[in-house]
């Protein structure tokens, strides 16, 4: 189920999905999957409505959550009356904000331990009964004007709610749920706000049983009127523990200490500035002012045609994540991605990978922001090829600073057509010349599948069980060595990597522009689990057009379900496509003729196997 944010929908419009009235019950847990991705995503709320009572907000998410399905949990405490759940989607500022739901279940018993808390709906953690005052949530006039989650006064953060006559040294403690550190270590990450040192002290403890022990993290000096990130590696493998947040009361001046967006994840914490974007955006975030657009967290391809990466840099697959700026935002518009705060440095190196290709390529720049001043350190403009490129930037600073990645969108005639993406950020002490690349350009290692009846490496100079489509304009050709046209096509097959091996290709000479050639797989029976089509393709040349994948049933094409356009470089590249067609069908590979003669398209090592596609390694 999803809401369509396109017109005539207006900002603030609401759509509600309501369960049937449920009988009185003991403790239950509602679980569901949600997808919130786009430039202008609104809010997804979950309420419980008990008979004769006002609906109670149980759960909430606002803004883009990345191009992926995420799991939500809503605890339902014992109810003596009938109840029902209400899923409410609120439309954002524009059409780029669809919200989707799937797989809603309600089970008996408590929900799993949550590993994150944004304080939007409740405190999540438990108050101590042995301290001097309590924590609360909300927005305080004397505290930060907006929370970290939403960046607005509509959100909530947690703060110690001290009385005016509180004694200096009094404390307030907040306990996480008990959890077990599953691997060698876990990482506690949170955002905190401390605008005045006289407010007191913020401590973090790791409690085992009744013993709290010494603080594993502490801060007691002013940090300015900004949200800052903190990370603590929890080195207690196999132990059942609780995290304890403690504030010790200071001089009682106006102001407060606040925390927000607390998460606990498996694995040791990364070093400052390092981010692969696989789990989140780490300490890198969009800025609320100064730019025109936001960076989006994404996996797979971008929405723009002929632009943006299809895979991330870290994993070289469509399952990996990266950050990008959507070209539909308009030429000349800028988006800033801002780092956490770094201490002064005599010599350090920022390294990252960027992707920028297409007509109207814009500019990507790196700035240092210190004492309110922006200093440009590095930039690149124009088409950089359909590849991930590495950047290394040397820098120094005598004061605390932040790094800012700016994407300025370009244009071509009347069209904006270039997404700009970044991945694998890293920041290390010392000059770049001394750094070892920690995220090298990966080598694609496809998963291994059992042989199938539709597999073909073309090395017998045949198309195996695949056949030419008689309703297209011309045919695929099986041959070895190079194609007959200079400046296009492979120099050998993929199977053997030599000129002796065979592959199938469409010849871009002697046919009309936009002519199409299709080759069809053997017939495939229905499958409840779907199938995985996998193949290697070669698209090199100035006039390369489309390679598309369709399913075909009864002579009718459905799709395309996968496509690639334009010059992809003089190399073989891997693709896999999950096939979900029902009934008996065939797979169709279609190559089309571009506007000139340098446009040969080739495929090799084609296979179809039962079940979903597997991640590449």
Image: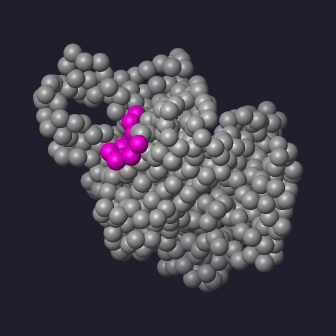
Q: Is 585 or 566 nearer to us in this picture?
A: 566
What percent of the width, then of the height, locates residue 167?
50, 40
Looking at the image, how many numbered discs can be counted on the residues?
A: 0
What percent of the width, then of the height, locates residue 548?
55, 52
Question: Mainly helix, strand or loop, the magenta region?
Answer: loop
Q: Is residue 233 left or right of residue 530?
A: right
Magenta segment includes 126: yes
What percent of the width, then of the height, locates residue 485?
75, 67
Q: Does residue 100 appear in the picture of this structure?
A: no
Q: Does residue 47 appear in the picture of this structure?
A: yes
Residue that appears at 32% across and 57% down? 178
What percent of the width, then of the height, locates residue 374?
85, 46
Residue 349: quadrant of the picture: bottom right
Residue that appears at 46% across and 46% down? 171
Locate the N terminus and report the quarter of the image it occupies. top left
Q: Is 373 or 106 nearer to us in this picture?
A: 373
Residue that appears at 64% across and 70% down? 439
Residue that appears at 41% across and 42% down? 132
Question: Vertically, is 57 above or below 235?
Answer: above
Segment tinted magenta in the rendering: 120-132
């Amino acid at each position: 189920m999803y809401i369509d944010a396109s017109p005539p929908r207006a900002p603030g419009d609401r759509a509600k999905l309501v369960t049937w009235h449920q009988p009185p019950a003991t403790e239950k847990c509602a679980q569901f999957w949600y997808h919130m991705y786009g430039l202008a995503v609104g809010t997804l709320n979950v309420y419980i409505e008990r008979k004769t009572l006002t609906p109670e907000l149980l759960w909430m998410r606002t803004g883009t959550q990345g191009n992926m399905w995420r799991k939500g949990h809503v605890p339902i405490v014992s109810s003596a009356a009938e109840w029902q759940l209400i899923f409410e989607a609120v439309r954002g500022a524009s059409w780029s904000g669809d919200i989707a739901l799937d797989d809603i279940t309600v089970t008996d018993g408590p929900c799993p331990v949550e590993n994150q808390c944004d304080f939007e709906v409740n405190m999540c953690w438990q108050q101590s009964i042995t301290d001097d005052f309590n924590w609360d949530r909300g927005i305080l006039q004397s505290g930060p004007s907006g929370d970290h989650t939403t960046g607005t006064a509509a959100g909530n953060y947690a703060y110690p709610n001290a009385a005016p006559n509180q004694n200096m040294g009094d404390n307030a403690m907040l306990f996480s749920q008990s959890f077990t550190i599953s691997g060698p270590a876990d990482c506690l990450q949170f955002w905190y706000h401390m605008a005045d040192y006289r407010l007191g002290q913020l401590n973090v403890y790791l409690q085992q049983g009744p013993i709290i022990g010494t603080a594993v993290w502490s801060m007691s000096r002013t940090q300015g009127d900004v949200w800052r990130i903190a990370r603590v590696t929890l080195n207690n493998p196999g132990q059942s523990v609780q995290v304890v947040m403690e504030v010790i009361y200071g001089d009682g001046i106006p102001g407060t200490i606040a925390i927000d967006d607390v998460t606990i994840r498996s694995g040791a914490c990364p070093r400052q500035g390092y981010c692969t974007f696989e789990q989140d955006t780490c300490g890198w975030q969009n800025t609320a002012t100064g730019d025109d657009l936001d960076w989006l967290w994404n996996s797979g391809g971008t929405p723009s045609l002929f632009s943006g990466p299809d895979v991330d840099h870290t994993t070289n697959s469509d399952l990996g994540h990266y950050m990008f700026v959507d070209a539909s935002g308009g030429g000349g518009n800028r988006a800033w991605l801002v780092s956490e705060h770094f201490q002064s440095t005599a010599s350090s190196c920022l390294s990252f990978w960027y992707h920028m290709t297409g007509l109207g390529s814009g500019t990507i720049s790196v700035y240092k922001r210190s004492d309110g001043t922006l200093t440009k350190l590095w930039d690149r403009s124009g088409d950089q090829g359909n590849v991930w490129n590495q950047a290394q930037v040397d820098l120094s600073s005598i004061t605390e600073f932040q790094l800012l990645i700016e994407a300025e969108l370009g244009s071509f005639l009347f069209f904006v057509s270039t997404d700009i993406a970044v991945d694998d950020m890293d920041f290390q002490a010392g000059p770049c010349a001394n750094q070892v690349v920690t995220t090298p350009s990966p080598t694609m290692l496809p998963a291994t599948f059992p042989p199938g009846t539709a597999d073909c490496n073309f090395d017998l100079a045949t198309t195996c069980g695949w056949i030419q489509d008689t309703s297209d304009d011309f045919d695929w050709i099986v041959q070895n060595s190079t194609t007959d046209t200079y400046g296009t096509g492979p120099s050998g097959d993929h199977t053997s990597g030599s000129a002796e091996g065979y592959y199938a290709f469409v010849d871009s000479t002697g046919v009309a522009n936009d002519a199409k050639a299709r080759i069809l797989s053997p017939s495939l029976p229905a499958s409840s689990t779907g199938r995985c089509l996998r193949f290697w393709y070669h698209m090199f040349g100035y006039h390369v057009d489309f390679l598309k994948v369709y399913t075909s049933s009864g002579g009718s094409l459905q799709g395309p379900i996968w496509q690639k356009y334009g010059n992809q470089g003089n190399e073989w590249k891997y693709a896999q496509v999950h096939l979900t067609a029902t009934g008996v069908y065939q797979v169709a590979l279609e190559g089309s003729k571009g506007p000139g003669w340098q446009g040969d398209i080739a495929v090799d090592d084609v296979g179809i196997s039962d079940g979903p596609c597997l991640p590449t390694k």
